[in-house]
């Protein structure tokens, strides 16, 4: 249901406690900064994963020949 209605895309705001209810609601700039930061972290994690996969693929594709030693 959440996926069909789009409600799942809305940010979850913390519940206000006491008289400082207005101060706990983040501004649009704060939400944008948090979203940007979270997106950057996920991008960097994906990039590291792809880099690691590329290293493994290169190792698997490398010829299976032992290096020669000179005497």
Image (tube, grey):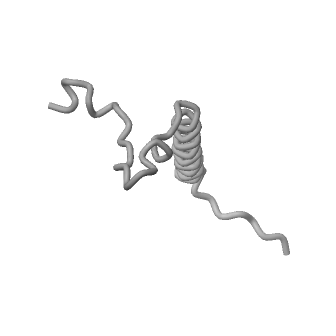
Work out whether 65 lies above or below 50: below
Count of labels in the image? 0
Please state if 69 lies on the left or on the right of 42 as rendered: right
| Observer-nearest of 41 and 31 | 31
Residue 30, image x and y in percent?
A: 56, 38
In the rendered view of the protein, which quadrant contains the C terminus?
A: bottom right
Decide if residue 51 is in sight here: yes
Q: Residue furthest bottom?
A: 71
Residue 2, image x and y in percent?
A: 20, 32
Residue 53, image x and y in percent?
A: 52, 48
Which residue is drawn at the image coordinates 59% and 37% (left, top)? 33
| Observer-nearest of 6 and 62 | 6
Q: Residue furthest front?
A: 19
Which residue is drawn at the image coordinates 37% and 55% (left, top)? 17
Residue 3, image x and y in percent?
A: 22, 29
Q: Residue furthest right?
A: 71
Please state if 68 lies on the left or on the right of 6 as rendered: right
| Observer-nearest of 66 and 18 | 18
Q: Residue furthest top?
A: 5
Which residue is drawn at the image coordinates 33% and 31% (left, top)? 9
Decide if residue 58 is in sight here: no
In the rendered view of the protein, which quadrant contains the N terminus?
A: top left
Please state if 18 lies on the left or on the right of 57 as rendered: left
Which residue is drawn at the image coordinates 52% and 30% (left, top)? 28
Work out whether 70 lies above or below 35: below
């Amino acid at each position: 249901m959440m996926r069909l209605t789009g409600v799942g895309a809305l940010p979850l705001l913390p519940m206000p406690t006491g008289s400082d209810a207005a101060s706990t609601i983040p501004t649009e700039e704060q939400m944008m900064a948090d979203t940007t930061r979270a997106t950057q972290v996920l991008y960097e994690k994906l990039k590291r994963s792809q880099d690691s996969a590329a290293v493994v693929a290169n190792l698997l594709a490398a010829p299976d020949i032992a290096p020669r030693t000179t005497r």
